[in-house]
Amino acid sequence: MDQRHLQEMAHLEDTYWWHVAKRDLVVELLKKHAPTAGIVVEGGIGSGRNLLEFQRLGFDVHGYDLLDASIEMAKQRGLEHVRRQDLHDAWPLEDGSVSAVVMLDVLEHMAEPVPVLEHAARVLKPDGVVILTVPAYPMLFGKWDEILGHHRRYTKRTLRRHAEQAGLDLAWCQHWNSFTLPAAMGMRLKERIRPQRDAAEFPRVPKWVNSLLLRCAGLERSLLLRIGMPCGLSIAGVLQHADRERQPISSVASKSRPNTAVGRAAGV
């Protein structure tokens, strides 16, 4: 992520529907699948807004990013355990010490994603999980992806293969952001016919449209957590140790959490 995109993210994270919807989904996945306490590590922290939400769940939050500006923003939010770290290098945490690793739209930036997942697997507790999101559909790869430094867009099969190569199982996997897929496909087609994009910026929408999209995202989240979604612009996944006792993670009942207030997240 470059400095310009980081500044835009910091400005939008508390209100823009995409940021809010993604964070709300990840919070639900943490509540449902992760151990109820311990360390959560986020790789690629942006401005640190997600870590605040995970902290409200009762986790001890740690964050890694390559941008010094990201680390500074996170520290300004009162987050202490944040540091500059290349995710390809060994993570400064003990083996089996982490309840959850969160990487939201990060793996597509990695030329070699498997070593990153291997580092995540090493630090996970036996019952820990990796929660991630990645952009879907290689056929949609375009100028937007190039500007953002993406190496690929994912299919479920590709994500599963990368997980297995790192010693992890893709225990739960669903598409999300289905309701904007037709518009995104139309925009990609238009760009191929008449290339014009020179910056990767989130489309600004009126407040009422933003609220409507948040409602759509809430309805979609309820459906995908129960019955799944057949399509969507992104893929969300929950990974666990490959040698973990085989129990379908999607059938695990939601766990009780410390009685801490969880404000509504804002995120893309």
Image (cartoon, helix red, strand yellow):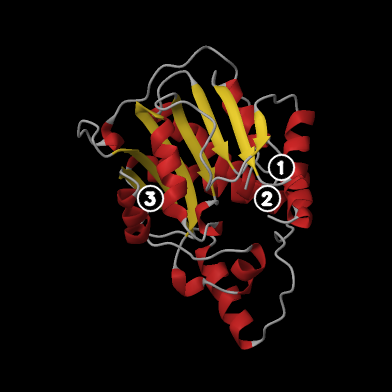
Q: Dots 1 and 2: beta carbons under 8 Å?
A: yes
Q: Residue at x 59, y 83 (%)?
A: 192
What's the distance in space between the residues labelled 3 and 2, CA to CA? 23 Å
Any mark on residue 115, and which? none
Q: Residue at x 51, y 64 (%)?
A: 181
**Along the horizontal axis of the image, is 190 left or right of 251?**
right
Q: Residue at x 79, y 56 (%)?
A: 4
Residue 223 can be seen, yes or no: no
Q: Position of residue 81 (x, y in %)?
A: 65, 26
Any mark on residue 15, and which? 1
Q: Position of residue 82 (x, y in %)?
A: 66, 31
Q: Secondary structure at mark 1?
A: loop
Q: Between 209 and 1, which is closer to the camera in this rendering?
A: 1
What's the distance in space between the residues labelled 1 and 2, CA to CA? 8 Å
Q: Earlier in the sequence, mark 1 or mark 3?
A: 1
Q: Between 53 and 90, which is closer to the camera in this rendering?
A: 90
Q: Residues within 10 Å of mark 1 (few under 14, many from 20)?
A: some
Q: Dots 3 and 2: beta carbons under 8 Å?
A: no
Q: Secondary structure at mark 3?
A: strand
Q: Earlier in the sequence, mark 1 or mark 2?
A: 1
Q: Badge 2 is on which residue? A: 210
Between disc 1 and disc 3, the foreground one is 3
Between disc 3 and disc 2, the foreground one is 3
Q: Earlier in the sequence, mark 3 or mark 2?
A: 3
Between disc 1 and disc 2, the foreground one is 1
Determine the residue located farthest toward the left in the rendered image.
246
Determine the residue located farthest toward the top in the rendered image.
259
Q: Quadrant of the N terminus?
A: bottom right
Q: Position of residue 11 (x, y in %)?
A: 78, 45
Q: Badge 3 is on which residue? A: 174
Q: Secondary structure at mark 2?
A: helix
What's the distance in space between the residues labelled 1 and 3, CA to CA? 24 Å
